[in-house]
Image (tube, grey):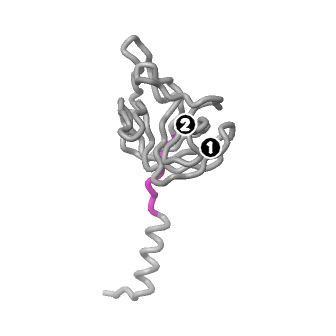
Amino acid sequence: MKSFSRRGFLGLIAFVAFHSPARAATQLAFDELYEAQSVLGLKFTEKVKALSGANVTMRGFMAPPLKAEAKFFVFTEIPMALCPFCSSDADWPDNIVVVYLDEKQTFVQANAPIDVEGTLEYGSWTDPETGFVSLLRLRHAQFGLA
């Protein structure tokens, strides 16, 4: 039986690391978020339910932030002139997602398309720090110009 050398072992680890599929983020589009809207509110698609807790990427626009630097922003399907925060989840628009970052960051212009990647959460939730209500969130997110 042939034994591995240290170089051979390190080469094997490098090969496995390079060729193993990384935990790739699943692409999620705004038109895949909800399947229906009724008097009871918005109904999430099966895709959103299946991806809860998974890493997803989305393309859209950053709504104008309340502050120049913060740990969160509203992510929208189309450019917006005003921040679209809602008073409750009953009147939550079907084309926004709240994005929570791990650290405060300076934001980009509201009319520039961006890609966002983060962990998907769905369901009504009130942020204890801001009081903002959301139906969809991306946690531990990062973003960049598209």
Residue at position x 36%, y 29% in the image: 124
Q: Residue 21's quadrant in the figure?
A: bottom left
Q: Residue 63's quadrant in the figure?
A: top right
From this view, report whether residue 5 is shown above or below residue 146: below
Q: Quadrant of the N terminus?
A: bottom left
From this view, report whether residue 10 is shown above or below residue 130: below
Residue type (three-letter) at the residue carrying disc 1: Ile
Q: Residue 84's quadrant in the figure?
A: top right
Chief secondary structure of the magenta portion? loop
Q: Position of residue 36 (x, y in %)?
A: 44, 18
Judging from the image, what secondary structure is the residue with disc 2 in?
A: strand
Residue at position x 44%, y 69% in the image: 16
Residue at position x 54%, y 45% in the image: 116
Is residue 23 on the magenta stretch?
yes
Outermost residue, top side: 39
Q: Which residues are magenta?
A: 20-27
**Label drawn at residue 75:** 2
Q: Position of residue 76 (x, y in %)?
A: 57, 33
Judging from the image, what secondary structure is the residue with disc 1 in?
A: strand
Is residue 81 on the magenta stretch?
no
Q: Position of residue 25 (x, y in %)?
A: 48, 48
- Seen from the viewer's position, the closer of residues 51 and 108 is 108
Q: Which residue is mark 1?
A: 114
> Can residue 74 be spotted in the picture?
yes
Bin the neighbour count of mark 2 within 10 Å (Cα to Cα): few under 14, some 14-19, many 20 and up.
Answer: many
Residue at position x 65%, y 38% in the image: 110
Which comes before the other along the chain, label 2 or label 1?
Answer: 2
Residue type (three-letter) at the residue carrying disc 2: Phe
- Seen from the viewer's position, the closer of residues 99 and 70 is 70
